[in-house]
């Protein structure tokens, strides 16, 4: 079909081995999400994976908690400079939002519950980000760094502590957002099974 | 070292004292004065030059003085004040009463200066929402807070919540950090009068501290002090018999006036008495009188420093961003912590018109309305003086590659001692043909002198006529093709005259124009970059900052004929050619060609 618009992006299907997956029955995963690698990928209940999000389990297991939202073009388990293979490459807690174009490198990287990884942010290999943190757009967490709970990383690495105590509210907001997304994104978990 | 693209900076004649002298004689005839410019070559490296060189786009032009005006020498006037956040135009009368900050609900985050939004603080989270997410969001109600969506700062961190979502500025000015209300002047007065309040306040403090330990905020203390001193001034007169009724008028009362007069006229018993009484003015001794004991106990601040560390303290820039807050606690133990910063109301911005400093004519005036970005008057220099574009010239013929090989690539480093050629394109923006005379020193100033040769220092540029006008004027036909043909013809014609060189054979000839167009002329400048080494001296051998930058000072003199000044349009038509007069404009500019390899 010449009338069809061709994307400049490489075709979705043609990349890497198919990883073993452990999906909860209630997740929403887009047809064009990219799951590659050799280690298992586990996604827990009610999480949403947007189209073209890339989960790469080549360097270890990837675990996504409950009610997480993985946005478009974000990368989980990017093999960083180390290239080491570890037991658990990336572990996301519950209610984690990984926004558009963010990258989380593989290598025992942990993102705590309720944390928002902003647009284009980068989390280095082995970093441990605490609970309810906010990484503002394009902020970077160095490899191996430990970010305490409730930290806001903003404006080129400045840190402050979030004292709003709105974790509950935020979780509710995420629940509502997931509810909308579930209707917007046609889910096709069977494709990856 | 980063390569640079060639640039042209123009020196505004306002700044340099030597050029100030010259600009005065430009008004008189300058035809003979061209020679004595040689010993006053403008040095682009001189420290003063930093402040007088501007790109053409930054400069304005005064039509009445016929002079370039730079941002430094124009006089500015404020047209409007407006809030950059809500674009509300603030009348200048409000400005005097309410200060230079937005008094609507526009606030900046004290942490990251992002805009703050008013959000409701839902004090009671509804558990049913989670179970039934189809429910619409809870109606926005209850206390509101200012929150920053970027760094997640919230005004609840300093204990400030608002009852209403609008009129935040007024609400905030009544609140102190921690949410306690700031006293109004009336309340203060009532409290001072009411002894029961004082006693209750003392018992509230619990530990039985005396009244003088009570914390006063700045405003209350000032009000107390003010009333105390006023009463002190009035007191001596009050006992002065008979005039007690006027005593509370203070300074302006006739009694105080007579007292002051008697001090100076001197001598009598009455004066002595008055003097004694003046000396009897005492300082404040009680809280009611405005006494505030210094709070030297800083253990709380130290403890906070221990727990929060350096990150917990506010930087000086943050503190200076804070608006003055008179309702705040006393200066002792004043907040230096991030946790005590208040939201910043947006500073107002201005639109300014610019005047010529000499003739007071307006040379730039923006539209008064905030939303429009247009200008009513804007006399930019770009539409009066020729623009100079620099392009490295690579000669494509055989010998050319060795001569200016590196100069062919824009931004490449210049090889020392290898001649390089640059094409200067002068574009005429005005509707008269202009005559340009260039003057450049044979060697650039500074320790490392590069040789400069302007191959054609004198030429004429045709007027900036409308492309289509010209095409239609041509009887033989219209269209760009004709135009171009005619252009070529003219060029050939000029070449015969000796004013041009045909660019087909790539030969550089002294005194000839490289290329010419409708309203532009290109000429060639040859430079031989300096060898950046000195023969002797180890200390001196090192390059100073930007000494490898090849900058050529060039004196540009533009001459043209124009309609006489001050004439009405009709008069010019009547007088025809007699009304035309010769104009000239002369200024220094600096051509930055690139860096020399070293």
Image (tube, coloured by chain):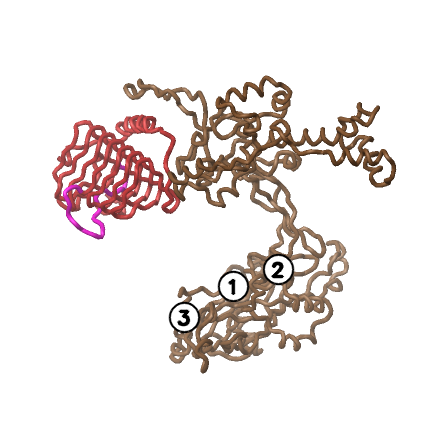
Q: Which residue is drawn at 15% across and 41% down?
A: A61
**Residue depth check, mark 2 versus mark 3: number of the one nearer the observer:** 3
First along the sequence among labels 1 and 3: 3
CA–CA distance in space, label 2 to label 3: 33 Å
**For this view, does B210 lie left or right of residue B145?**
right
Crowding at mark 1 (Cα within 10 Å: few <14, some 14-19, many 20+): some
- Residue B343: x and y in percent read 49, 35
Residue A29, picture quadrant? top left
Badge 1 element: helix
Q: Disc 2: which chain?
A: B
Q: Disc 1: which chain?
A: B
In the picture of the structure, the residue carrying the numbered disc 2 is: B384
Nearest to the observer: residue A190 or residue B47: B47
Q: Do labels 1 and 3 share a chain?
A: yes
Residue A74 part of the magenta-drawn span: yes
In the picture of the structure, the residue carrying the numbered disc 1 is: B482
In the picture of the structure, the residue carrying the numbered disc 3 is: B413
- Residue B235: x and y in percent read 75, 28
Q: Give the range drawn in magenta.
A: A70-88
Tint applied to chain A in the drawing: red
First along the sequence among labels 2 and 1: 2
CA–CA distance in space, label 2 to label 1: 28 Å
First along the sequence among labels 2 and 3: 2
For residue A59, say whether it is visible. yes
Badge 2 element: loop
* Chain painted in brown in the figure: B
């Amino acid at each position: 079909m010449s009338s069809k618009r061709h994307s400049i992006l490489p075709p979705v299907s043609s990349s890497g081995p198919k990883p073993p997956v452990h999906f909860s029955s209630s997740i929403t995963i887009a047809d064009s999400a990219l799951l590659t690698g050799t280690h298992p990928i586990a996604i827990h209940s009610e999480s949403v994976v947007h189209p073209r999000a890339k989960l790469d389990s080549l360097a270890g297991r990837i675990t996504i908690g409950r009610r997480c939202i993985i946005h478009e073009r974000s990368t989980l388990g990017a093999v960083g400079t180390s290239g080491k293979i570890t037991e658990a490459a990336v572990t996301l807690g519950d209610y984690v939002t990984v926004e558009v174009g963010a990258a989380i490198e593989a290598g025992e990287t942990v993102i705590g519950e309720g944390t928002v990884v902003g647009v284009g942010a980068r989390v280095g290999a082995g970093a441990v980000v605490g609970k309810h943190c906010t990484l503002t757009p394009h902020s970077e967490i160095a490899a191996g760094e430990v970010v305490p709970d409730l930290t806001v990383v903003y404006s080129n690495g400045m840190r402050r502590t979030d004292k709003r105590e709105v974790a509950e509210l935020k979780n509710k907001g995420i629940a509502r957002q997931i509810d909308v997304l579930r209707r917007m994104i046609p889910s096709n978990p069977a494709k990856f099974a | 070292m980063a390569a640079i693209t060639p640039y042209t900076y123009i020196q505004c004649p306002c700044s340099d004292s030597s050029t100030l002298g010259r600009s005065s004689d430009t008004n008189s005839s300058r035809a003979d004065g061209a020679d004595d410019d040689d010993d006053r070559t403008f040095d682009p490296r001189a420290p003063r030059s930093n402040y007088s060189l501007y790109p053409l786009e930054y400069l304005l032009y005064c039509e009445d003085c016929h002079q370039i005006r730079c941002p430094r020498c124009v006089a500015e006037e404020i047209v409007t004040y407006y809030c950059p956040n809500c674009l509300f135009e603030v009348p200048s009368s409000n400005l005097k009463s309410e200060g230079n900050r937005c008094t609507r609900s526009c606030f900046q985050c004290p942490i990251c200066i992002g805009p703050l939004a008013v959000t409701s603080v839902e004090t009671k989270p509804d558990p049913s929402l989670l179970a039934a997410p189809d429910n619409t969001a809870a109606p926005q109600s209850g206390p509101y807070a200012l929150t920053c969506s970027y760094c997640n700062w919230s005004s609840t961190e300093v204990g400030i919540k608002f009852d209403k979502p609008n009129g935040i500025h007024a609400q905030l000015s009544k609140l102190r950090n921690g949410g306690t209300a700031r006293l109004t002047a009336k309340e203060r007065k009532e409290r001072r009068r009411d002894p029961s309040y004082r006693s209750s306040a003392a018992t509230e403090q619990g530990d039985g501290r005396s009244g003088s330990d009570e914390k006063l905020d700045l405003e209350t203390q000032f009000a107390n002090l003010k009333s105390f001193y006023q009463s002190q001034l009035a007191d001596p007169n009050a006992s002065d018999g008979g005039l007690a009724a006027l005593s509370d008028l203070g300074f302006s009362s006739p009694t105080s006036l007579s007292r002051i007069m008697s001090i100076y006229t001197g001598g009598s018993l009455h004066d002595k008495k008055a003097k004694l009484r003046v000396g009897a003015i005492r300082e404040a001794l009680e809280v009611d009188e405005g006494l505030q004991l210094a709070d030297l106990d800083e253990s709380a601040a130290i403890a906070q420093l221990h727990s929060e560390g350096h990150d917990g303290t506010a930087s000086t820039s943050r503190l200076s961003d804070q608006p003055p807050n008179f309702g705040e606690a006393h200066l002792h133990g004043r907040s230096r912590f991030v946790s005590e910063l208040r939201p910043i109301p947006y500073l107002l911005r201005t639109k300014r018109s610019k005047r010529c400093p000499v003739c007071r004519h307006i040379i730039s005036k923006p539209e008064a309305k905030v939303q429009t970005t247009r200008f009513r008057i804007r006399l930019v220099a770009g539409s009066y003086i020729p623009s100079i574009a620099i392009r490295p010239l690579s000669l494509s013929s055989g010998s050319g590659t060795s001569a200016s090989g590196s100069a062919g690539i824009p931004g490449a480093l210049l090889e020392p001692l290898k001649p390089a050629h640059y094409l200067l394109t002068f574009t005429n923006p005005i509707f008269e043909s202009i005559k340009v005379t260039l003057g450049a020193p044979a060697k650039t100033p500074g320790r490392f002198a590069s040789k400069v040769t302007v191959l054609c220092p004198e030429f004429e540029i045709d007027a900036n006529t409308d492309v289509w006008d010209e095409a239609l004027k041509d009887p033989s036909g219209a269209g760009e093709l004709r135009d171009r043909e005619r252009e070529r013809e003219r060029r050939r014609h000029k070449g015969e005259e000796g004013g041009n060189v045909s660019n087909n054979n790539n030969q550089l000839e002294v005194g000839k124009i490289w290329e010419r167009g409708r309203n532009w002329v290109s000429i060639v400048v040859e430079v031989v970059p300096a060898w950046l080494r000195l023969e002797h001296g180890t200390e001196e051998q090192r390059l100073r900052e930007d000494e490898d930058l090849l900058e050529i000072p060039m004196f540009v003199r533009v001459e043209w004929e124009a309609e006489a000044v001050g004439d009405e349009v009709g008069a010019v038509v009547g007088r025809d050619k007699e009304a035309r007069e010769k104009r000239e404009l002369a200024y220094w500019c600096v051509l930055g060609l690139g860096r020399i390899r070293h």
